[in-house]
């Protein structure tokens, strides 16, 4: 179980998260119609290395790149390809950093130029779902309070939550217990975990316009909606404190 319990660990983790946040900001500034996806991956990797840090995803279980880049109906884990971004697409950028032996993980979905009203609403709802989940990450609450608040909000807006992929603890490893589902029904054992000061969690709702069901491409990595509908993904690494959750990324 993740436990960041002293000032030096918090400082080390925070530095990893700050590098990651700055990386995503640099990538987002370079997202526009006509941009190369491979160029985005290079921008991210070059910046992370310039900070004397390492890309957390590259080489993880054999993943070949620094970023995961997932476009439109791709939910997560898209491998950067030799392709050009187009007006009207949405692109989910997920990235991780290793610094001071601590991992960070964060994602955001970005509009490519002008997008449809439906896609914009999807982005707004998914980002707000993350905010709502974080607001419920309080000492004494359970994982259930995060998960249930995300599911209730997303479904009340007419969208669906992906259930095969969930958030997680993070720290000296990329994935640590507890898991943080974005849904509370059906119940899972993780939902009973009580939140304590010092826990660091990566909360990451993945929201589809259509049905929640997914499929995996032949590359073994790219996961997309089964019905071809658009999907969005927002994620922050946060620290549970005795006062309120602290967003690190």
Image (cartoon, helix red, strand yellow):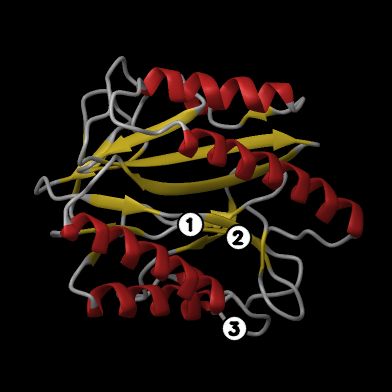
Q: Is residue 118 above or below residue 138?
A: above
Q: Which of the two labelled residues, at mark 2 and mark 1, occupies the earlier sequence position? A: 1
* Pointers 3 and 1 in contact (C-beta within 8 Å): no
- The answer to which quarter of the image holds residue 136 is bottom right
Query: Around disc 2, counting alpha carbons within 10 Å, would you say few (fewer than 14), some (14 to 19), or many (20 or more)?
Result: many
In 3D space, how far apart are the residues under numbered discs 2 and 1 (Cα atoms)? 7 Å
Query: Around disc 1, counting alpha carbons within 10 Å, would you say few (fewer than 14), some (14 to 19), or many (20 or more)?
Result: many
Near-viewer residue (167 or 81) = 81
- For the question of whether residue 59 can be seen, the reply is no
Q: Position of residue 152 (x, y in %)?
A: 32, 80
Q: Quadrant of the N terminus?
A: bottom right
The residue furthest left is 227
Query: Around disc 3, counting alpha carbons within 10 Å, would you say few (fewer than 14), some (14 to 19), or many (20 or more)?
Result: some
Tell me what residue is drawn at x 75 percent, y 60 percent.
3
Label 3 sits on a secondary structure element that is: loop
* Pointers 2 and 1 in contact (C-beta within 8 Å): yes
In 3D space, how far apart are the residues under numbered discs 3 and 1 (Cα atoms)? 17 Å
Q: Which residue in the protein does label 2 denote? A: 201
Tell me what residue is drawn at x 55 percent, y 35 percent.
26
Describe residue 102's horizontal placement relative to residue 175 as left or right: right
- The answer to which quarter of the image holds residue 182 is bottom left
Near-viewer residue (2 or 87) = 87
Describe residue 53's horizontal placement relative to residue 185 as left or right: right
- Tell me the tag on residue 190: none
Label 2 sits on a secondary structure element that is: strand
Q: Is residue 72 above or below residue 203?
A: above
Q: Which residue in the protein does label 3 denote? A: 141
Tell me what residue is drawn at x 72 percent, y 42 percent.
16
- So how many labels did they put on this image? 3
Describe residue 226's horizontal placement relative to residue 153 as left or right: left
- For the question of whether residue 243 can be seen, the reply is yes
Q: Which residue in the protein does label 1 denote? A: 167
């Amino acid at each position: 179980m993740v436990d960041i319990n002293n000032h030096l660990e918090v400082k080390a983790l925070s530095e990893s998260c700050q590098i990651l946040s700055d990386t995503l900001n640099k990538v987002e500034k370079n997202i526009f119609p006509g941009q190369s996806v491979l160029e985005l991956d290079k921008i991210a990797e070059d910046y992370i290395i310039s900070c004397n840090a390492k890309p957390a995803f590259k080489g993880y279980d054999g993943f070949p790149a620094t970023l995961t880049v997932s476009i439109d109906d791709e939910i997560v884990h898209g491998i950067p390809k030799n392709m050009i971004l187009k007006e009207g697409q949405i692109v989910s950028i997920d990235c991780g950093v290793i610094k001071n032996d601590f991992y960070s993980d964060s994602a955001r979905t970005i509009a490519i130029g002008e997008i449809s009203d439906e896609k914009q609403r999807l982005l707004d709802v998914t980002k707000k779902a993350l905010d709502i989940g974080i607001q419920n990450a309080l000492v004494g609450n359970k994982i259930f309070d995060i998960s249930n608040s995300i599911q209730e909000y997303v479904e009340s807006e007419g969208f669906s939550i992906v259930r095969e992929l969930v958030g997680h603890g993070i720290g000296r490893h990329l994935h640590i217990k507890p898991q943080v589902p974005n849904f509370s029904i059906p119940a899972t054992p993780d939902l009973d975990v009580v939140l304590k000061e010092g826990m660091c969690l990566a909360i990451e709702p993945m929201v589809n316009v259509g049905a929640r069901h997914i499929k995996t491409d032949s590359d073994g990595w790219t996961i997309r909606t089964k019905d071809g509908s658009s999907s969005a993904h927002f994620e922050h690494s946060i620290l549970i404190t005795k006062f309120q959750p602290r967003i690190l990324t």
